[in-house]
Image (spheres, rainbow, N blue to C red):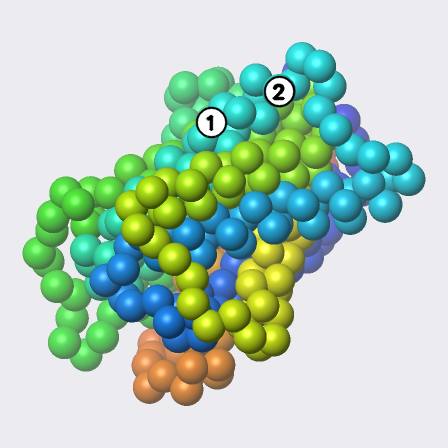
Amino acid sequence: MEEKETVLNKGWVVALLAGICCFLWGSAFPCVKIGYAMFGIDSTDTASQIVFAGARFTLAGVLTVLIGSALSRKFLKPQNGSWGMVFKLSMVQTVIQYLLFYIGLANTSGVKGSIIVASNVFFAILISALVFRYETLGAGKMIGCLLGFIGVVLINLTDAGLDASMSFAGEGFMLLSTVSYAFSSVLIKKYSRMENPVTLSGYQFFFGGAIMTAVGLVFGGKLHSFTVGSVLLLIYMAVISAVAYSLWGILLKYNPVSKVAVYGFMNPVFGVILSAVLLKEQNQAFTLRGLISLILVCIGIYVVNRDFSPSKSKEC
């Protein structure tokens, strides 16, 4: 079955919108660290980190629905038969993914966490092709993904190399988190055929965020130091999720999963660069290695998208 031809199928449009999403998600890396400091959350206080994430996603859900409703000139709400899709998506995309992510990140290094998260591109394409049969898995896609992944590993390597130690509660949970994210990408593709992707994003964020907040509070998590600055930061992080996931969902509706997912390699690259700017961290962002990393990621994106020329039919 062919994708409906729209401006959202055009390569430059996908690149522009996906680039905006990745820039926003990349800015979340330093913003999370800044938020922990502003709200007085210790790096080992996983329960409070989950409350922080839950508050962010609950607010993101509210903002998504309000903004989407204003743009649509009608209040967005799921159709009667869509509530099951909203619940499943909220569990996979928000609750399971981020619970595993925050617990895993607390038990591993940020470098290894960034590299493992980049593997979600592989999982998204594999699940789309092999489990849901939405597209074929060609050599070009795998080579492009491999180049992008090498670029992510390169920009995250330190002079001391990469620690090879692993634990299930650390690297294991991070890996499971990427699998959950990959499934959510394919579910958005599937469900957006029947429901507005902005509506799906808004309500799944709200319910998923509420569940995460409740879980964090049950385990003793809390937020401190509410100030104008910390509240504004929380709102900005909610806007990141509201805008980025809504745009991503729209792109997935009109394009094959692999064509969109491969841009995910830009997330950690933007994360490293923006962390260097906002946190003034001495890292590898503005070095020859950082430049080579960016080039590899761009080549990988090009190789994957080369399979989607206008003359070729677009598979579902």
Q: Residue 86 or 221: which is nearer the viewer?
A: 221
Among the 4 quarters of the image, the one containing residue 292: bottom left
State the SS at label 2. helix
State the CA–CA distance, disc 1 to disc 2: 23 Å
Q: Which mark is residue 209?
A: none
Residue 165 in percent (x, y) is at 8, 56
Q: Residue 120 or 208: which is nearer the viewer?
A: 208
Among the 4 quarters of the image, the one containing residue 131: top left
Q: Residue furthest right?
A: 73
Question: Going by the image, does 38 lie left or right of 20?
Answer: left
Crowd band around label 2 with a 10 angstrom C-alpha radius: few (<14), some (14–19), many (20+):
some
Dot 1 or dot 2, earlier in sequence: 2
Mark 1 belongs to which amino acid?
Answer: Ser
Residue designated by label 2: 83
Question: Going by the image, does 69 lie left or right of 156?
Answer: right
Residue 278 in percent (x, y) is at 48, 81
Residue drawn where x is 16% and y is 71% of the image = 161
State the SS at label 1. helix
Which mark lies nearer to you, 1 or 2? 2
Specify the quadrant that holds the C terminus.
Answer: top right
Residue drawn where x is 62% and y is 62% of the image = 235
Mark 2 belongs to which amino acid?
Answer: Trp
Residue designated by label 1: 128
Specify the quadrant that holds the N terminus.
Answer: top right
